[in-house]
Amino acid sequence: MSALTWWIIAEPNASGMTNATKELISEAVRQGGDVSVVTWGDTSAELVDGAGRYGARAVLQLDVSTGFVPGAPVAAAVAALCAARSPDVILLPSSYDGRDIAGHLSARLDRPVLTNVTALSVDDDVVTQHQIFGGTKIASARITSDGVALIVVRPKSFTAVEEPRDVTLERIDAAPSPVTPVVITESHLDERTGPALGDADVVVAGGRGLGGVEAFANVATLATLLGGAPAASRAIVDAGWVPYAYQVGQTGQTVKPTLYVACGISGATQHLVGMKGAQYIVAINKDAAAPIFSVADFGIVGDVNTVLPALNALVRSRTA
């Protein structure tokens, strides 16, 4: 197969470029071919510099208003650009906006979308891998038809590696979307201190074994002491102990920290999917047969509400 043309759909943010965008650029560069970043709104110098730092050759900035939910207007602009330039592959992050844009693009281009992709390769075709049945099986898909391949990638599936190249910025006039766009009337950002969950080098997660919402304070304390982020299993999110933004697992966030501490988490497959890529996993659970110990590098069998306060006191004494 000749070298492919890759487009990376990059959501603009306050820091210029999301980590998911860096991961997608790096993987496209690794696969070989011409890599461009497609974005919208007021493109920052940080985004352009970041695109070049991770190996993109060009940034295509669509003149689309930032006052709308980006799905319909961005997809309309990208579809029009596809007709003129014919990319081979479009990679999108598995975020709210990424999935929204992918759905609109699929309808406009009459192309299928491959979602929840965790790995890809190129031989005569583009081949993708997908976790199914709660992450217990891997399914492969091969794109054999002509036309652009639309691929939505799960976060943390690839590693962002800097490979600096010269990058150009091209501003593109986008035709108005024929669909009345959804207007953003209000935005809400969850308040937090410390690193974002998806970016944290240390993650401390609590589960149902904590026994009650009050006990989660010890999880948050350990995360703070270690300079990390608190997280949770689906069970305690569904119980209303913590917000959904804390959830790690198949229906929550995927994290890949250096250290993951699982506190009172049994280790259901749906949770393991979201954290088993951590470099080191420490599990605290009173059930010695809990599945979490099968993936843990270090395990403590004991009551999490006894172990955590002692662990917090130890960390405090070592950092005082």
Image (spheres, grey):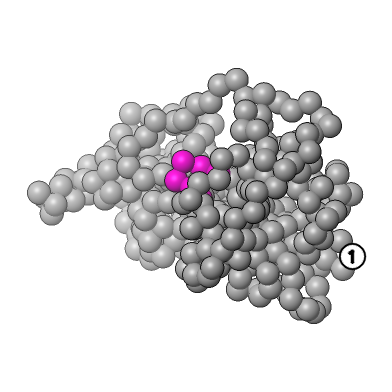
The image shows residue 35 at horizontal and vertical percentages of: 65, 65
The image shows residue 170 at horizontal and vertical percentages of: 64, 54
Q: Is residue 259 left or right of residue 74?
A: left
Q: Which is nearer the eye, 38 or 19?
A: 38
Q: Amino acid at mark 1?
A: Asp
Q: Which is nearer the eye, 9 or 213?
A: 9
Q: Is residue 61 above or below residue 89?
A: above
Disc 1 on helix, strand or loop?
A: loop
Q: Which residue shows up at 38% across the image and 61% down it?
A: 258
Q: Is residue 297 above or below residue 312?
A: below
The image shows residue 228 at horizontal and vertical percentages of: 33, 48
Dominant SS of magenta comes to loop
Residues packed near mark 1 inside 10 Å, few (<14), some (14 to 19) or many (20 plus): few
Q: Is residue 6 visible to the viewer in this orientation of the structure?
A: yes
Q: Which residue is mark 1?
A: 146
Q: Is residue 134 visible to the viewer in this orientation of the structure?
A: no
In reply to whether residue 15 is colored magenta, the answer given is: yes
